[in-house]
Image (cartoon, rainbow, N blue to C red):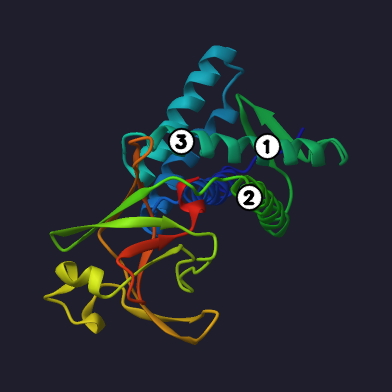
C-alpha cells in the first residue's frame, strides 16, 4: 500500500490545478492574474483530500468534481456570459488530457506509482516528473489549438470595442492571420490599431504614461521598428455577421494609419 503524504498531495494538486487554469486561460484567451489563479488553485487543491475518505458513490463523486471545477473557474475568471461555460469546458478538457497521460504512464510503471480514490489521484514520484508531465500536457493542448486555428474562417466582419480609463472606442475589426504579434512579457496577442483611430480614447494620456506601456520589436514587409503597446481595461470583439460578442485578453499596439483594429483570428477560438 502506498503511503499518502498530505503535504505532498496538496502541493501536487496545487501545482497541477494552477497550470490547468493557465491552460484554460490560454485556450479561451482570457485574462488571468497570477494571484487569482494561485488562490483558485489553492482552494481547489483541498478537494484532493477526498482521496483519504472511504469510497463514495459515483454520482456524489461526479457532483463534487463539478462543484470543485466550477468553483475554481469562477474564482479564477469570474462569471462572464457566453465565456464561463467555455472556460469550464477547457478546464475539464485539460484535466482529462492530463489524467489520460497519467493513466497511460501508470499502466507501464510499477504498481503504486499512482493511487486513485474518489476521482482524485496521488502520484508517488518526484516533482521533476510532475513538471515534465505537465509540460507535455500543456504542449499537446497548444498543438491541438494550433491545428484548430488553421481551419478558422476570416471572411466575417467585426467590430472591436476598447475601454480604457472610463472611455470606450469602437473600431472596425480586421481578422488577419498575418498579425502574429504577441507581448513578450505576458504572451498575450496584440491587436494593432492606428494612432489616429485611438485619438478619442487616449487624448488625455501621453503614450508613455499608458498602463502597461512598453515597446515591442516588430517587422513588416517594408520596415521594422518598435511598436508601442498598452494594457486596456477591456477588449471585446463583436462578429457583425452572427451578432455574438466576446471579451478577449489582448494588448493594444499603436501603429499605422489604418482606422481598423487588426487582430489574429485565433483570438476568437
Percent x, y of residue 4: 65, 39
Q: Residue at x 47, y 26 (%)?
A: 66
Residue tagged by mark 3?
Answer: 86
Which residue is nearer to you in this view: 243 or 30? 243
Q: Can you tell which of label 3 and label 1 is closer to the viewer?
A: 3
Q: Can you tell which of label 2 and label 3 is closer to the viewer?
A: 2
Residue 211 found in image quarter: bottom left
Which residue is nearer to you in this view: 200 or 251? 200
Residue 262 found in image quarter: bottom left
Residue 121 vertical placement versus 268 (above, below):
above
Q: Name the N-terminal-most of marks 1 and 2.
A: 1
| Few, some or many residues within 10 Å of mark 1 (<14, 14–19, 20+) | some
Percent x, y of residue 232: 27, 63
Mark 3 and mark 1 residues within 8 Å of each other at the beta carbon: no
Q: CA distance from mark 3 to mark 1?
A: 20 Å
> Which labelled disc corresponds to residue 150?
2
Specify whether 256 is left or right of 53: left
Q: For mark 2, give the secondary structure.
A: loop
Q: Name the N-terminal-most of marks 3 and 1.
A: 3
Q: For mark 1, give the secondary structure.
A: helix
Specify whether 114 is left or right of 68: right
Residue tagged by mark 1?
Answer: 99
Residue 225 vertical placement versus 144 (above, below):
below
| Few, some or many residues within 10 Å of mark 2 (<14, 14–19, 20+) | few
Amino acid at each position: 500500500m502506498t503511503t499518502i503524504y498530505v503535504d505532498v498531495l496538496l502541493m501536487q494538486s496545487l501545482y497541477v490545478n494552477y497550470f490547468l487554469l493557465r491552460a484554460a486561460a490560454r485556450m479561451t484567451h482570457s485574462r488571468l492574474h497570477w494571484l487569482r489563479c494561485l488562490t483558485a488553485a489553492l482552494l481547489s487543491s483541498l478537494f484532493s483530500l477526498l482521496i483519504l475518505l472511504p469510497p463514495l458513490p459515483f454520482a456524489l463523486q461526479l457532483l463534487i468534481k463539478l462543484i470543485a471545477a466550477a468553483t475554481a473557474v469562477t474564482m479564477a475568471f469570474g462569471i462572464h456570459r457566453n465565456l464561463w461555460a467555455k472556460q469550464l469546458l477547457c478546464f475539464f478538457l485539460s484535466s482529462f488530457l492530463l489524467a489520460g497521460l497519467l493513466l497511460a504512464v501508470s499502466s507501464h510503471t510499477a504498481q503504486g506509482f499512482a493511487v486513485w480514490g474518489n476521482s482524485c489521484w496521488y502520484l508517488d514520484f518526484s516533482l521533476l516528473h510532475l513538471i515534465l508531465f505537465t509540460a507535455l500536457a500543456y504542449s499537446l493542448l497548444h498543438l491541438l489549438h494550433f491545428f484548430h486555428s488553421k481551419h478558422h474562417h476570416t471572411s466575417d466582419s467585426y467590430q472591436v470595442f476598447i475601454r480604457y480609463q472610463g472611455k470606450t472606442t469602437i473600431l472596425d475589426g480586421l481578422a488577419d492571420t498575418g498579425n502574429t504579434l504577441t507581448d513578450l512579457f505576458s504572451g498575450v496577442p496584440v491587436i494593432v490599431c492606428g494612432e489616429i483611430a485611438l485619438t478619442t480614447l487616449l487624448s488625455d494620456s501621453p503614450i508613455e504614461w499608458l498602463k502597461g506601456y512598453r515597446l515591442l520589436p516588430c517587422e513588416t514587409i517594408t520596415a521594422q521598428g518598435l511598436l508601442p503597446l498598452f494594457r486596456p481595461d477591456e477588449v471585446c470583439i463583436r462578429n457583425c455577421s452572427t451578432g455574438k460578442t466576446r471579451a478577449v485578453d489582448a494588448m493594444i499596439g499603436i501603429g499605422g494609419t489604418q482606422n481598423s483594429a487588426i487582430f489574429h483570428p485565433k483570438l476568437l477560438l
